Image (cartoon, rainbow, N blue to C red):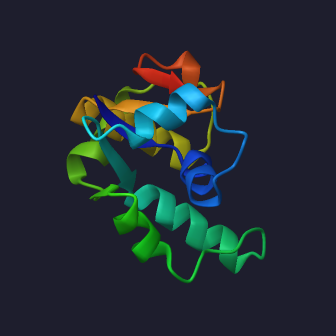
Amino acid sequence: MNLLLDTHVLIWCFENSKRLKASVREAITDSDNNVFVSAVSTWELTIKAALGKISIPNDFEAQRKRCDFKSLSISIQHTLALKDLPDHHRDPFDRLLVAQALAESLTLVTHNSTIWNYHVPVLRA
């Protein structure tokens, strides 16, 4: 399975949070699965850190590599796919993650029930 982590799921992984379901943690740590972290998430984290809402771990890249999470860049294909998404909500980060998941045939790992309204494969965290 190819998984794309929503930003909050990425944070939960790094923090080893109990909010992440055991079955989802197993899927993320299963070596048969490819797990992706999007530049969308680091963009979101950087903006929220600048606003004082969150802090980004100093060793973010080391943690990502240690977890063997692959990086996913934002492409023109991804941004153009936004025009085809229904307007379920206006969060630009979530919408771009949905577009990436659809364009790259990834399963989006999220706890955000609004995302569940899109026609994208979801693993409910």
- In the depicted structure, whether residue 12 falls above or below residue 45: above
Residue at horizontal 49%, vertical 24%?
Answer: 123
Please, which residue is most extreme toward the bottom here? 58
Q: How many marks?
A: 0
Horizontal side of residue 89 vs 107, given as left or right:
right
Residue 14 pos. (x, y %): 57, 60
- In the depicted structure, whether residue 94 falls above or below residue 122: below
Out of 85 and 59, give the one closest to the viewer: 59
Quadrant housing residue 77: top left
Q: Is residue 117 visible?
A: yes
**Which quarter of the figure is the C terminus placed in?**
top right
Residue at horizontal 49%, vertical 66%?
Answer: 43
Quadrant housing residue 53: bottom right
Horizontal side of residue 53 vs 64, given as left or right:
right
Residue at horizontal 40%, vertical 20%?
Answer: 121
Residue 40 pos. (x, y %): 44, 57
Residue 18 pos. (x, y %): 72, 42
- In the depicted structure, whether residue 90 falls above or below residue 116: below
Q: Is residue 87 visible?
A: no
Residue 76 pos. (x, y %): 23, 52
Please, which residue is most extreme toward the right here? 52
**Which quarter of the figure is the N terminus placed in?**
top left
Out of 79 and 101, give the one closest to the viewer: 101
